[in-house]
Amino acid sequence: MAALTFAAIDVGSFEVEMGIYEISNRNRIRKLDHIRHVTALGSDTYNNGKISYEMVEELCDVLAGFAGIMKSYKEYRAYATSAMREARNNRIVLDQIRVRTGIQIRIISNSEQRFLGYKAIAVSDDEFDENIQQGTAIVDVGFGSMQISLFDKNLLVTTENLPLGVLRIRGTLQDVNTTVEQYRDLIGEMVDNELENY
C-alpha cells in the first residue's frame, strides 16, 4: 500500500488543532506536522450555554487557514467534542464553518471520543494490552470533563464522565474571592464529592 497523507482536525474546548499524518504499512502512522490555536470555545459554552458570534469568527478564521494547508490532501476528518456538543447553537456554528471554510465538522459523542482516545493509546503504547490485564484505571482530565475508565482482564469494566474539566471548574469558581490555598481546597472538595458519588 502506498503511503496515505491524512489530516485530522480536533475542535476542542481549549484549542483547535490539526495534525497531518502519513499512514503506511511499513511505518504505521507518522506525524508530519501539528498546528494548534488556543481558543476560549469551552468558556463560551460552559459559562453561557452557547458559542458567541466573536468565537464563530475566530473559529472560521483558524479553520480557513487549516483548509488552505489541507488543499493538497485528499483525506481529512474533523471532529468536535464537548464544547461544541453542549452548545445550544452548535448547528448554526457548524453550518457557518462549512459555508465559510468548506470544512465539514462532525460532533462526536463522549463515547466515541473516549473510544478514539483508547485506540490512540493502544496504537502508541506497545504494552497497552499487558497493562490492562490487571486492575487499571485510565483517567483523562480534559478542559470540559474528566473520564475515568477501569479495565481488568483486558476488558473495560466501567467508565464514567465527570463534570470536572479544567475550564468547567474555573468557570464555577471564577466569582469566588478567596486565597490560593482555599481555592485549592475548594477544587479538592469538588473532585472528592464527584469521586465519592462515582
Image (tube, grey):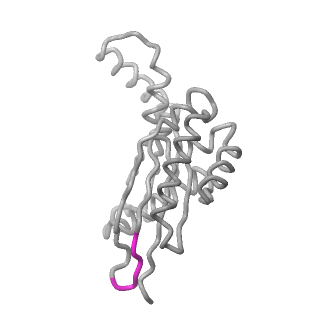
Is 25 covered by the magenta stretch? yes
Front residue (pair 40, 102): 102
- Residue sitting farthest toward the top: 177
In this rendering, position of residue 150 left or right of residue 32: right
Front residue (pair 141, 88): 88
**Number of on-image labels:** 0
Front residue (pair 123, 158): 123
Residue at the image point whose x is 62% and y is 59% from the top: 104
In this rendering, position of residue 85 left or right of residue 113: right
Residue 50 placement (x, y as % from top left)? 63, 33
Residue at the image point whose x is 44% and y is 45% from the top: 15
In this rendering, position of residue 136 left or right of residue 52: left
Residue 56 placement (x, y as % from top left)? 59, 41
Magenta region: 21-26
Residue 181 placement (x, y as % from top left)? 29, 16
Residue 59 placement (x, y as % from top left)? 53, 45
Residue 121 at least partly seen: yes
Residue at the image point whose x is 59% and y is 56% from the top: 101
Q: Which quadrant of the view contains residue 52?
A: top right
Residue 198 at least partly seen: no
